[in-house]
Image (cartoon, rainbow, N blue to C red):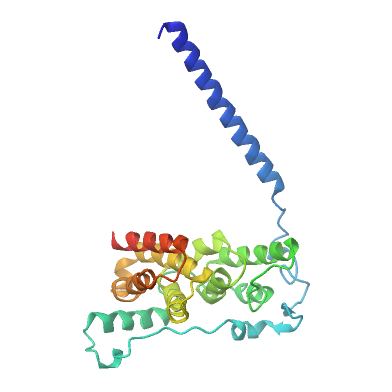
Amino acid sequence: MNGKTLISAICLLLAFCLALYFYADWQQQRFDAALPVPPPAADEQPGGHGKPGDDAHDNDTGDLIPSDDWQQHIEPRELVRPENLGELDPDDPIAKAWAKLDEIAENRFAWGGTAHPQTDELIAQLEWPPPRGMRSEAHAMDLSFVLTDLAKLRDPNAIEALVAYQCDSGMSSGLATQTLIALGPPVVPHLVPYLDEALKEKKGSKGVLKAARILSAIGTQHRADLDGIVEHIILPRFEQLLAEGFISSYKQGRVKEAIVALKQ
């Protein structure tokens, strides 16, 4: 290859790279322009995202749900404890892991975060029970703005609401996922029941995938704080999900990734 040919090839390569750069930049500008403009912050208007003084809202059936009743409309899930747990020696690793999980559940502020006066107001503005489908794009955006504001507070008292919307609703929020990961160990007792439910019903819901991702991240960041919970509660459930083979190949892949991350 002579010098002129080499220079021509380099120029063509540079032109191609520049074209890719400007195309990507153009696409980003189009995406940014399409984003909706968020409403004013909740503290700039009475009643936050709702109407001034709202303390209730409509669910899918049109019934009003009072703001202080939202927890009644979350599908109840329970931790499945070993049948012989009461017979185990307190120093048994499995017994210690379960005792630690109970301790964490009772001390949600031990890993940071503070109670925020706006938390209850924002939770009340969400739809309960969490909708599995959106009536319209505007409906989805309204809920998304409230969920984002709630996640920004990083209040441990919002854990149940954030988990319910991430795992039970037809929408998802990257910021809510990040907030749950940041809140750390106190989130774990609220996610493990999604794995238990899947194993009991032999059905891999969206909640399993979300729970696996968040549990994996918290488990890798707080291994010492969880003190045996990863080894004796989380990993056995992940491995059982794979062994029983009822979740889709895509979800199996995500669970395998979670297992690898937790075993490193």
Return the x and y of residue 23 as percentages of the image width and height: 62, 33
The answer to whether residue 149 is above or below residue 55 is: above
Along the horizontal axis of the image, is 151 left or right of 61? left
Q: Quadrant of the C terminus?
A: bottom left
Q: Quadrant of residue 107?
A: bottom left
Q: Which residue is drawn at 34% across and 59% down?
A: 261
The correct choice, above or below, for 193 with respect to 255 in the image is: below
- Numbered circles on residues, count: 0
Q: Quadrant where the N terminus lies?
A: top left
- Residue 45, position as x, y percentages in the image: 75, 66
Residue at horizontal 30%, vertical 89%? 85
Left/right placement of residue 52 relative to residue 244 reads right
* Residue 220: x %, y % from top left: 35, 62
Identify which residue, 203 or 65, lies in the foreground: 203
**Residue shown at 41% from the left, 6% from the top:** 2
Residue closest to the far bottom: 87
Can residue 109 be spotted in the picture? no
Q: Is residue 169 or residue 120 the one in the foreground?
A: 169
Specify whether residue 179 is in view: yes
Residue located 65% across and 78% down the image: 128
Res. 120 image quadrant: bottom right
